[in-house]
Amino acid sequence: MSWRKITMKFPGTCLVCNEKIDANEVGLWAKGQGVKHEKCAEIKELKCIVCGGPAGCPTCEFQDNCDRNIVSQLCICKKCSNSEMSYESYITSVKKKFPLINSA
């Protein structure tokens, strides 16, 4: 389903930046996905390979050197990166999502 531009009837939280979207503010909504600010829709956000949530591109330390249109989609968010078993979780997630990598 595509994103629809609407005036918010209720407050919500932006999926991209995790900041509040107030009632009567214009934003984008998609059924079953959530809401986001119009300005945040212009930002390409990668997903965390481990948890599936936003990887945190707008606040990433590599943001200035990262072309999100050509970079690997195997990013990890700060929360997962800071976990005790981050490397193991990353490897497990990659293997689950790309079983052909293990078939050699």
Image (cartoon, rainbow, N blue to C red):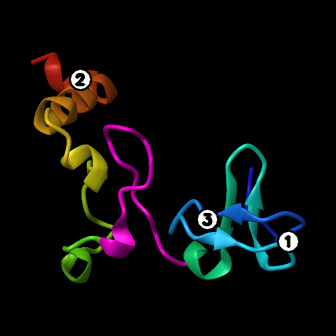
- Residue under the point 16% across and 31% down: 91
Q: Residues within 10 Å of mark 3 (few under 14, many from 20)?
A: many
> Regarding mark 3 in the picture, which secondary structure is present there?
loop
- Residue under the point 80% across and 79% down: 26
Is 8 on the left-hand or right-hand side of 15? right
Alpha carbon distance from label 3 to label 2: 35 Å
Alpha carbon distance from label 2 to label 1: 42 Å
Query: Which residue matches tag 1?
Result: 6
Query: Is 54 drawn above or below residue 89 in the view shown?
Result: below
Q: In the rendered image, which quarter contains the C terminus?
A: top left
Kindly identify the amino acid type of the residue bearing the numbered disc 3: Cys
Query: Is 94 drawn above or below residue 75 in the view shown?
Result: above
Residue mark closest to the camera, 3 vs 2: 3
Q: Position of residue 13 (x, y in %)?
A: 64, 62
Residue mark closest to the camera, 3 vs 1: 3
Residue numbers of the magenta segment: 42-59
Query: Is 26 drawn above or below residue 102 in the view shown?
Result: below
- Residue under the point 26% across and 77% down: 63
Query: Which residue matches tag 2?
Result: 100
Query: Which residue matches tag 3?
Result: 14
Kindly identify the amino acid type of the residue bearing the numbered disc 2: Leu
Q: Position of residue 14 (x, y in %)?
A: 61, 65
Query: Is 28 drawn above or below residue 99 in the view shown?
Result: below
Kindly identify the amino acid type of the residue bearing the numbered disc 1: Ile
Q: Mainly helix, strand or loop, the magenta region?
A: loop
Q: Marks 2 and 3: in contact by CB < 8 Å?
A: no
Is 27 on the left-hand or right-hand side of 86? right
- Residue under the point 44% across and 47% down: 53
Q: Earlier in the sequence, mark 3 or mark 2?
A: 3
Q: Marks 1 and 3: in contact by CB < 8 Å?
A: no
In the rendered image, residue 57 lying in the magenta stretch gets the answer yes
